[in-house]
Structure formats: C-alpha cells, structure tokens
Image: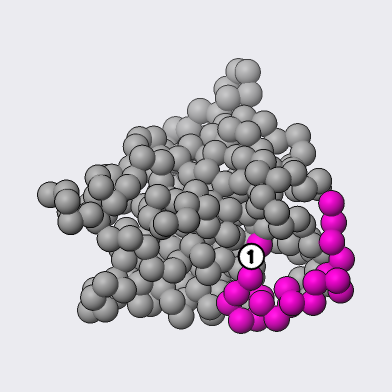
C-alpha cells in the first residue's frame, strides 16, 4: 500500500527533528543472494556458475536470506544479511555500499558499518555517515554519536551500540556476536510506505533487531531518491539511543567488534 505524504504531514516535521520512523526495503524478486565487496586493489573474477571468486586476502562477503519488497508493503517481511567482517576504512565502506546500498536492508547494515567506523575514527566515520544518510538526517545522527562514543561520558558511552544488533550478542555475554555476523531487518508491522515529494522517493519504514533494548525491534527508515543509485537512511533515532550495558552478572568485558 502507498500513503500520500499530504495525508501524513507529520512525517516532514519528524524528518527535520530527528524523529519519526522509516524502514528499509529490497526488490520484490530479492531472494538469497551472495556477492563480495573487497578492499581497494582487490581483483575479483566471476567463476563458473555465477559465483564470484575474490583474489584479495582482505575480502568481505555477504549473503542475504529473504527479502523486503520495495514496491509493495508487506508487514513484517524479513531479510537477514550474513557478512564476514566489518569494513574499517572509507574506501572499504565505499566498496560495501556498491553492493549493499542498492537494497533497503543493505542500507540499514551500511548505517551500522558507518556507526562502527565512527567509533574508531570520527573523521572517517563522519564521511561514511554522510554517504549512508540523507542530508536531512546526518546531523541528527552525528550530534548523538559524539556522546555515545566518548569515553568521558560515563554511562552514555556505549561502544557496544552496533554489537547489540548482531546475532547472538546479548548483555549477558558481553555482546559477543556469533560468527559469521548476522543482522536481521524487517518491514514495519504497521507503518506502510510513504511517498515524499521533498525527498523525491518512497520512504520505507523498517526495523532492525537488537538485543540491547527492552524493545527488540528498532525503527529505521530509508529512501532511494529519484536519480540516486543507493538507498539512504532518512530517520533512525531508535538505533542510536542509549543501549543496555554489559550485564554486571557476567565477568566478561565488552570486546570491540573489530577484535571479536
């Protein structure tokens, strides 16, 4: 179903105030797919049967199971992306966006990638966040992340933020994720898709699963504007609010994702 933006004028206000909910999508024909994204200088050649063999030592792969129809809203339609590792530089992020950014669920994962790069390098992370978000959303994200990833901010410092979205990671196990990494995204159970003249595209309301909050499904909205190649995050405060700390009942300390 499609809802004309004029019937939901509140959306425009929410987008400019770091609020609201928008969800990711994938094509109607999206099924299980596999492809790699490589670091710069990595050479890849297609092998027999359509598989892609990567020659570089530092190659990342992802696989999408399920899919979210970007044209027709279907409540709770789910996509799970399995991936081998996190990109750690701007160039690696760009490579990831080339393959992940063309689907709504992929755009959600790219936002998490950008969060984690920002955790380690604010300058590089800011560049990635600008690529992953619409211009109307990125300032909202950066304003909060500078506190989330500041060790001097006490309980507001949450380096485990992205880990909460990974399969198997919980406060009780120090947010140690299962390998390979997995992130699950679904279409919002109630909020359909909305056409937006200001964004020149259809806003998809999605949710990402996390074990870091009392409410597991965290709202995130994406859009692919007319003439653009990639989906971008347009609204997602639920993904960067303060998450649960590592449980005091465990002896485990949080281990950085890049070292898990």
Counting from the top left corner in percent of width and height, residue 113 is at 45, 56
Residue at point 48%, 44% (across, down): 183
* Residue 80 at least partly seen: yes
Choose between 217 and 220: the one closer to the eye.
Answer: 217
Residue at point 38%, 55% (across, down): 212
Q: Which residues are magenta?
A: 1-22
| Residue closest to the far top | 48
- Give the answer, above or below, for where 58 lies relative to 225: above
Judged left or right of residue 215, residue 138 is right
- How many numbered discs? 1
Label 1: element kind: loop
Residue at point 79%, 77% (across, down): 9
Choose between 68 and 213: the one closer to the eye.
Answer: 213
| Residue closest to the far left | 251
Residue annotated with mark 1: 21
Which coloring applies here?
A: one colour
Choose between 222 and 230: the one closer to the eye.
Answer: 222
Q: Is residue 140 magenta?
A: no
Residue at point 60%, 18% (across, down): 48
- Give the answer, above or below, for where 29 lies relative to 48: below
Judged left or right of residue 232, residue 93 is left
Quadrant showing the C terminus: top left
Judged left or right of residue 86, residue 246 is left
Counting from the top left corner in percent of width and height, residue 52 is at 55, 29
Instruction: Bin the neighbour count of mark 1 within 10 Å (Cα to Cα): few under 14, some 14-19, many 20 and up.
Output: many
| Residue closest to the far front | 214
Location of residue 18 by image quarter? bottom right
Counting from the top left corner in percent of width and height, residue 226 is at 81, 63
């Amino acid at each position: 179903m499609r809802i004309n933006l004029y019937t939901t004028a509140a959306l425009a206000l929410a987008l400019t105030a770091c609020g609201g909910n928008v969800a990711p999508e994938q094509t109607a024909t999206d099924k299980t797919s596999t492809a790699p994204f490589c670091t710069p200088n990595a050479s890849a050649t297609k092998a027999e049967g359509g598989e892609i063999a990567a020659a570089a030592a530092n190659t990342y792969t992802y696989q999408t199971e399920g899919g979210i129809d970007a044209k027709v809203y279907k409540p709770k339609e789910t996509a799970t992306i399995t991936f081998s590792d996190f990109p750690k530089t701007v160039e690696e992020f760009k490579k990831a966006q080339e393959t992940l950014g063309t689907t709504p669920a992929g755009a959600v994962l790219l936002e998490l990638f950008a969060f984690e790069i920002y955790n380690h390098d604010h300058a590089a992370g800011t560049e990635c966040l600008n690529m992953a978000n619409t211009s109307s959303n990125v300032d909202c994200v950066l304003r909060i992340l500078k506190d989330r990833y500041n060790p001097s901010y006490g309980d507001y410092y949450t380096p485990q933020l992205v880990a909460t979205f990974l399969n198997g990671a919980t406060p009780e196990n120090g947010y140690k994720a299962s390998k390979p990494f997995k992130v699950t995204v679904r279409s919002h159970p109630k909020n359909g898709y909305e056409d937006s003249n200001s964004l020149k595209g259809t806003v998809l309301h999605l949710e990402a699963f996390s074990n870091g909050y009392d409410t597991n499904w965290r709202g995130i909205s994406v859009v692919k504007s007319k003439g653009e190649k990639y989906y971008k995050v347009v609204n997602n405060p639920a993904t960067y609010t303060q998450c649960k700390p590592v449980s005091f009942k465990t002896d485990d300390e949080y281990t950085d994702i890049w070292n898990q």
